[in-house]
């Protein structure tokens, strides 16, 4: 059957770079027509927004009835460009005739991570006596079996490194050993795909923007009561509300007086663009990492419309179906970890925006009200601002406006 | 009240308890062992040892009768008979020799043995009521308490022990041979004893609620045993529920899989439906230890949820095997002596002394698949082993299970006459981390059953020589 080279197809105009993020097949796998072989990440020229994961499928790789070819792959894979065209280094080879022959055991002595170490009872016992965890010791024997000599070598290495307490004589190990072994393994994890995208975005934001973070505590007792009442009476028909739609509504109202906060700052052109629309980015954790889908025109949405949109976008982002439009164009961002929100956070601004509102955990605290201590539902907002274009006073006034709105929920619905 | 203090107090003188006590004493720990009945526990007195003796006697008798019925070996025997009273004396002699041996070992190593039943006061104190003339209460304080009270036969609510209804204990010391024995429970204890009774000449019926015998073992392993039971004339009633003793206080009322109720003839009924941890009757509940089902919950060092209180053996649950308890006991003694130990064996072998015997060590192909391991397995039949032919026992096979990627052996199973002795090789290969190539390249003596072990490994590698 020979080697079958699959070239990176021309994805389309404006693609600057294609990165191979993951293989969907393994060496020795049979492939059929229309089967996804690999997951690629496309970088679109002149667009710094989050990348889109795309799948490429191979054409003409044979049909299902024909003897299926096996795929051999090479790794690791550097980014490839369509210009080079020799991008995908996928080669197809005929499957070896292994059907009746004995399977060949790998002679590798490297134990896959997580595998139980293989060692004789005597070696195990000596390792316990020496206070050495066998999972840190590499085995030189067949199938990665740890021998007495491997243990000696590891112990000697520990002594050389100055960890004599755990690796010296058993007596000393008992006397001063903690019973915990030191870990000396390391694993190089390539930062690729979405993770690389996030890293670049974060670095860009922190390098360019002088952040300052302002924290205020909000009494959300009444807000939470209203929310619970709405959920009890209308939750079944219209969907349940979290605290986020209320916060979005408060931000929409407060931003009317602080248009410089609902903005994007192009520092190279020295232009701050203010927006009439409030497009709120919602920082969302996905399996691949952080994504920021955008609730468009929050100013034109009621509580349930916002809630439904947040839920829809979060699902789209997590399932990888979010479109580029849904992942870009926000004018301000909310970061919330719900019950994991902690007491204070220092959110990183979603560049080129100028503000981000962080939601901390809601918690029942004793508060002074009218000279007595009462239990109140308290929640902190930790918000970061771009100090180049927003003064501390204005940031504080904006957050105080949000606080007043949230503490008196009725005002949220007064125009 | 008399007082006594010790560093290590062992409750229970079974295989786990006495081994722990001996090892602790060897390591210089002041050790006291409390046993209410006989040293040696279930294993030596009413379990492994007497049942093996009983099975051996039955096998020997059956062999002679087999020869009497026109043996192909040319041996001629005239109407053999068995003197059951003498058989029991011989069996009891072995038990006595072993239990006295245990007592001597304990004494030699300086363990203080106290006869009497322990009642727990708290995690550091027990009281012992001696069953002798001395009725004074003895209070024992300790630094470490090791619980090794063992297990007891499970009683069926519909069939309480007493009269014709007996447990394995009574079945190993019968006053006479019953004409018809019904065994309730098709597990290893029921089948081992049922087979022995059949070989001694009793009519034997086994009643099992499940649709198969030996449900703990896979079908392939059980098949030769089922064939042999049929050949011996042991009647199997599978999928049948026990309702109670028959109308005249004899016989057993049973409902079969079709829902039909009838009475099985029986002048003795052996209930062997399992064993459960002995956690009642000595105020153990007052310690409020964490449990794992009915068993005491332990970690990989046999520590219970209470500091300074340890538990080993059957009371800690399955697998309820003497050799597990012994290994645990030895380990606990060494930990108390300040050594670093863990109970992390590669495998705990399990042997079923039916005819033929079954051995399971490590993972079966099903176990491995469930654990997500990509394994290959191969078996070599005794029908192709010359030694098995000379022993007139070509039923069964040896099976090996190994990882496909590096050929590390993860399990051995065998069924056949005498395979219990192959267990040593199986366990050792697992503990040493042997690969198929290691066993395949080891010279195994000819002609022995062990050659089947090597051939199974060779077969897994795709080049068996004798099949």
Image (spheres, coloured by chain):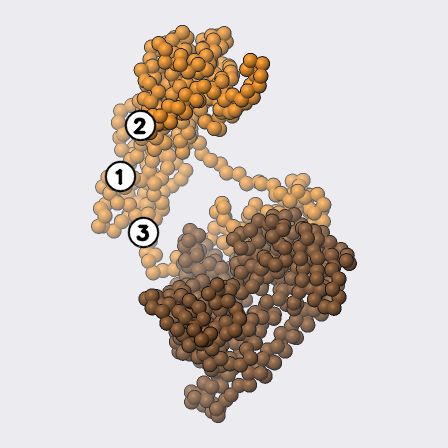
Chain colours: A orange, B brown
Q: Which mark is residue A95?
A: 3
Chain hosting mark 3: A
Tell me the SS state at disc 1: loop
Along the viewing direction, whichever of A240 and A300 lies nearer the viewer: A240
Q: Residue at x 36, y 69 (%)?
A: B261
Percent from the top left, x then y, of residue A237?
31, 27
Between disc 1 and disc 2, whose residue precedes?
A: 1
Residue B97 in the image: above or below residue A57: below
Residue appearing at x 51%, y 88% in the figure: B81
Residue drawn 32% across and 22% down?
A: A305
Mark 1 vs mark 3: tell me if same chain.
Answer: yes
Instruction: Classify residue B54 as left or right of residue B148.
Output: left
Q: Name the image quarter holding residue A277.
A: top left
> Residue at 44% of width from left, 60% of height from top?
B364
Q: Which label lies toward us, 1 or 3?
A: 1
* The N terminus of chain B sits in image quarter: bottom right
Label 2 Cα crowd, 10 Å radius (few <14 / some 14-19 / many 20+): few
Q: Which one is in front, A393 or A164?
A: A393
Q: Is residue B406 visible?
A: yes
Give the alpha-carbon distance from disc 1 to disc 2, as whole Å: 46 Å
Instruction: Label 3: state its secondary structure.
Output: loop
Q: Position of residue B316 (x, y in %)?
A: 57, 56
User: How far across and how far down the image is residue B443, in percent?
Assistant: 51, 69
SS for tag 2? helix
Residue A53 in sight = no
Chain containing mark 2 = A
Please tell me in which quadrant of the rendered image residue B50 appears: bottom right
Question: Which sits earlier in the primary sequence, circle 3 or circle 2?
Answer: 3
**Could you say which disc has been placed on residue A237 in the image?**
2
Query: In the rendering, which numbered label is found on residue A58?
Result: 1
Rendered location of residue A293, percent (x, y): 36, 24
Q: State how far apart marks 1 and 3 are (Cα).
A: 19 Å
């Amino acid at each position: 059957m020979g080697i079958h080279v699959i070239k990176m197809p021309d994805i389309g105009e404006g693609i600057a770079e294609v990165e191979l993020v993951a293989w969907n097949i393994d060496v020795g796998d049979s492939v059929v027509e229309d089967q996804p072989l690999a997951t690629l990440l496309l970088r679109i020229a002149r667009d710094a927004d989050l990348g889109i994961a795309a799948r490429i499928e191979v054409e003409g790789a044979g049909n299902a009835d024909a003897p299926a070819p096996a795929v051999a792959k090479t790794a690791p894979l550097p980014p490839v460009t369509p210009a080079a065209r020799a991008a995908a280094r996928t080669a197809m080879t005929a499957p070896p005739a292994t059907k009746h022959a004995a399977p060949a055991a790998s002679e590798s002595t490297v134990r896959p991570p997580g595998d139980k170490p293989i060692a004789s009872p005597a070696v195990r016992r000596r390792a316990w006596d020496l206070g050495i965890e066998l999972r840190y010791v590499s085995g030189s024997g067949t199938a990665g079996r740890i021998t007495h000599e491997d243990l000696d070598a590891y112990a000697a290495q520990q002594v050389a490194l100055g960890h004599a307490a755990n690796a010296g004589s058993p007596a000393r190990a008992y006397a001063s050993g903690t019973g915990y072994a030191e870990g000396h393994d390391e694993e190089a994890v390539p930062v690729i795909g979405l993770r690389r995208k996030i890293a670049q975005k974060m670095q860009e934001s922190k390098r360019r923007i002088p952040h300052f973070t302002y924290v205020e505590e909000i009494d959300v007792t009444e807000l939470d009561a209203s929310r619970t009442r709405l959920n009890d009476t209308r939750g079944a028909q219209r969907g349940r509300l979290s605290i986020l739609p209320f916060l979005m509504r408060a931000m929409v109202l407060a931003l009317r007086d602080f248009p410089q906060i609902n903005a994007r700052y192009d520092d190279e052109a020295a232009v701050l663009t203010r927006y009439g629309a409030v497009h709120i980015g919602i920082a969302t954790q996905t399996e691949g990492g952080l994504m920021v889908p955008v609730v468009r025109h929050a100013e034109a949405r009621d509580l349930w419309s916002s809630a439904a949109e947040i839920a829809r976008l979060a699902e789209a982002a997590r399932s990888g179906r979010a479109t580029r439009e849904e992942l870009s164009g926000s004018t301000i961002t909310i970061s919330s970890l719900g019950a994991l929100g902690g007491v204070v956070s220092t959110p990183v601004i979603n560049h080129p925006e100028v503000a981000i509102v962080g939601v901390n955990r809601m918690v029942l605290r004793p508060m002074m009200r009218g000279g007595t201590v009462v239990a109140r539902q308290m929640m902190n907002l930790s918000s970061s601002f771009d100090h180049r274009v927003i003064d501390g006073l204005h940031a504080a006034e904006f957050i105080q406006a949000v606080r007043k709105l949230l503490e008196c929920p009725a005002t949220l619905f007064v125009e | 009240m008399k007082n006594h203090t010790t560093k290590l107090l062992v409750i229970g003188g079974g295989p786990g308890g006495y081994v722990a006590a001996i090892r602790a004493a060897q390591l210089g720990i002041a050790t006291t062992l409390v046993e209410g009945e006989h040293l040696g526990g279930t294993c030596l007195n009413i379990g492994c040892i007497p049942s093996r003796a009983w099975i051996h006697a039955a096998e020997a008798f059956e062999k002679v009768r087999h020869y009497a019925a026109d043996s192909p070996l040319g041996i001629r025997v005239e109407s053999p008979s068995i003197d059951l009273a003498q058989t029991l004396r011989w069996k009891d002699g072995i038990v006595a020799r072993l239990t006295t041996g245990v007592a001597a070992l304990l004494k030699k190593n300086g363990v203080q043995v106290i006869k009497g039943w322990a009642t727990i006061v708290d995690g550091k104190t027990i009281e012992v009521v001696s069953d002798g003339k001395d009725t004074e209460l003895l209070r024992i304080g300790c630094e470490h308490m090791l619980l090794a009270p063992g297990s007891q036969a499970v009683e069926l609510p519909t069939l309480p022990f007493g009269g014709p209804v007996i447990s394995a204990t009574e079945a190993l010391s019968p006053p006479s041979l019953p004409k018809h024995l019904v065994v309730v429970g098709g597990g290893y204890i029921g089948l081992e004893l049922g087979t022995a009774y059949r070989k001694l000449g009793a009519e034997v019926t086994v009643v099992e609620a499940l649709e198969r015998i030996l449900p703990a073992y896979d079908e392939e392993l059980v098949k030769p045993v089922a064939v042999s039971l049929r050949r011996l004339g042991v009647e199997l009633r599978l999928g049948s529920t026990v309702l109670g003793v028959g109308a005249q206080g004899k016989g057993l009322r049973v409902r079969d899989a079709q829902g039909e109720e009838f009475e099985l003839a029986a002048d003795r009924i052996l209930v062997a439906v399992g064993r459960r941890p002995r956690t009642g009757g000595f105020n153990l509940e007052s310690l409020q230890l964490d449990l794992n089902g009915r068993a005491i919950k332990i970690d990989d060092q046999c520590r219970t949820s209470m500091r300074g209180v340890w538990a080993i053996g059957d009371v800690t649950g399955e697998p309820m095997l003497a050799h597990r308890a012994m290994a645990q006991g030895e380990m606990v003694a060494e930990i108390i002596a300040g050594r670093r130990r863990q109970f992390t064996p590669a495998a705990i072998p399990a042997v079923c002394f039916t005819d033929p015997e079954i051995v399971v060590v490590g993972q079966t192909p099903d176990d491995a698949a469930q654990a997500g391991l990509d394994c290959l397995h191969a078996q070599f039949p005794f029908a192709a082993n010359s030694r098995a032919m000379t022993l007139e026992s070509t039923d069964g096979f040896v099976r090996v299970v190994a990882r496909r990627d590096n050929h590390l052996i993860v399990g051995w199973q065998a069924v056949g006459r005498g395979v219990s002795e192959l267990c040593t090789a199986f366990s050792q290969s697992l503990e040493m981390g042997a690969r198929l190539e290691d066993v395949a390249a080891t010279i195994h003596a000819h002609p022995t059953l062990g050659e089947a072990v090597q051939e199974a490994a060779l077969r897994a590698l795709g080049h068996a020589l004798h099949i």
